[in-house]
Image: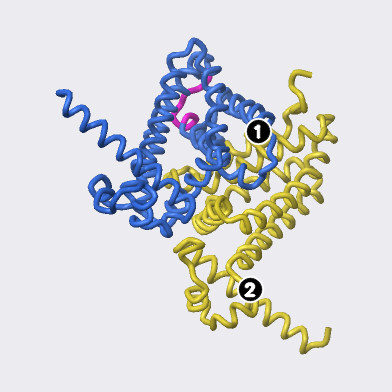
Chain colours: A yellow, B blue
């Protein structure tokens, strides 16, 4: 890539980031339906035509926001995988995840995306695809940790563990809303303990009667 | 109350229930902001004037929906308290809570209420008041269970435990959206195991360095 193309590229990246920040603010404040492209363009300080140049519609903006969140998690999880003690790195990472999901901006935006997913198949597909990619990634790390400790790594155990872990982290989005007086430090330590118990549980057999 | 007054009363109750059901459908389908009183009145098959006779505004409708959910939980938890084995009754009850929150209608409506709470102080206050009442109730039951097992019941432990428990249950609202292929039975058993571990954990001291 020559220097000129690279400048164009980073200018486009900056524009996209500017639109995503403005759209996030609008979705949080007015909801997905309440936020119009014209409102987003006003907040971003650029024309609606410019927005459409980068994003076909509001769903495409949601897809970019969700992709950005997935990147954050994949980067974080890569650092766990590279750690000397993968389990302890995950437990430390859990504190970062709690902090992020307790943040009012993150929580408001993500609750809105989840609410929209429950009525908008296009947004649901975006969220479900990101979940699948996230789960594949975390599954591999869980297998690594549990294998090292001689714990079962059958598919049923790993899949169920991922669902319970995901449930716990998503629940944090609602906690700050429900309990504004939350003692975040104490909560985080207790949450980390629950994550540790879950990850090191012997196993969830596919058929518990077997 | 004479017979006539009682008929009036139950007719009013039926009207209110009809409005709540219609409003729940509209909030789920169009979001809190997207759902207008005129739309709710059309769905309920009554005039907007009738709706305003029972509810001042959409926030008052949300308050009634949240109060109804709280009643459900208070009734359920009264049955735990009356059980021979309170802990086992709670664990059984956890399965009912998971089933309820995995239900797409419940999840859609509650995610919308949480998203609205994060931007609407009036709705946030409704949700927070209900959470406080719920927490007071569950706290008492947790103290009962833990005291019987010789586990610590200090305020810090109970408050933190309630926050982690609440987080887990609220996360279930998002799980069905994120993973439509969820194995609900296996998930529920694993979730119950995590709830049991949490409730029977030795304690979360106010100051972990102490």
Q: Give the x, y percent position of residue B140.
A: 41, 24
Chain assignment, label 2: A
Q: Residues within 10 Å of mark 1 (few under 14, many from 20)?
A: some
Give the residue drawn at x 69%, y 58%. Answer: A72
Label 1 sits on residue: B184
Q: Which mark is residue A95?
A: none
Q: Quadrant of the C terminus of chain A?
A: top right
**Residue ranking furthest to the top:** B84
**Residue ranking furthest to the left:** B2
Q: CA distance from mark 2 to mark 1?
A: 37 Å
Q: Quadrant of the N terminus of chain A?
A: bottom right
In the rendered image, residues at marks 2 and 1 fall on the same chain: no
**Is the C-beta separation of discs 2 and 1 under 8 Å?**
no
Residue A172 appears in which quarter of the rendering? top right
Residue B155 appears in which quarter of the rendering? top left
Specify whether residue A26 is painted magenta. no
Chain assignment, label 1: B
Give the side of residue A22 with respect to residue B67, left or right.
right
Give the side of residue B97 with respect to residue A178, left or right.
right
Residue A159 appears in which quarter of the rendering? top right
Q: Give the x, y percent position of residue A86.
A: 78, 43
Name the secondary structure under disc 1.
helix
Eyeballing the image, is B152 above or below A98? above
Give the residue drawn at x 78%, y 40%. Answer: A142
Specify whether residue B153 is painted magenta. yes
Eyeballing the image, is A187 above or below A32? above
Q: Which mark is residue A55?
A: 2
Range shown magenta: B151-158
Foreground of the two, A120 or A159 = A120
Name the secondary structure under disc 2.
loop
């Amino acid at each position: 890539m020559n220097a000129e193309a690279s400048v164009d590229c980073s200018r486009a990246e900056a524009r996209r980031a500017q639109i995503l920040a403005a759209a996030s603010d609008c979705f949080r404040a007015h909801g997905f339906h309440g936020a119009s492209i014209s409102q987003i363009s006003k907040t971003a300080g650029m024309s609606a035509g410019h927005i459409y140049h980068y994003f076909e519609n509001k769903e495409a903006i949601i897809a970019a926001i969700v992709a950005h969140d997935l990147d954050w998690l994949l980067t974080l999880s890569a650092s766990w995988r590279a750690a000397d003690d993968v389990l302890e790195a995950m437990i430390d990472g859990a504190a970062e995840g709690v902090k992020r999901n307790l943040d009012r901006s993150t929580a408001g935006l993500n609750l809105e995306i989840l609410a929209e997913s429950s009525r908008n198949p296009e947004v649901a597909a975006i969220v479900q695809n990101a979940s699948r990619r996230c789960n594949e990634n975390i599954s591999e790390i869980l297998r690594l940790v549990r294998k090292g400790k001689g714990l079962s790594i059958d598919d049923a155990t790993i899949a169920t563990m991922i669902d319970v872990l995901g449930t716990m982290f998503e629940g944090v989005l609602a906690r700050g809303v429900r309990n504004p007086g939350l003692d975040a430090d104490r909560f985080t330590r207790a949450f980390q303990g629950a994550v540790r118990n879950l990850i090191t549980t012997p196993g969830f057999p596919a058929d518990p009667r077997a």
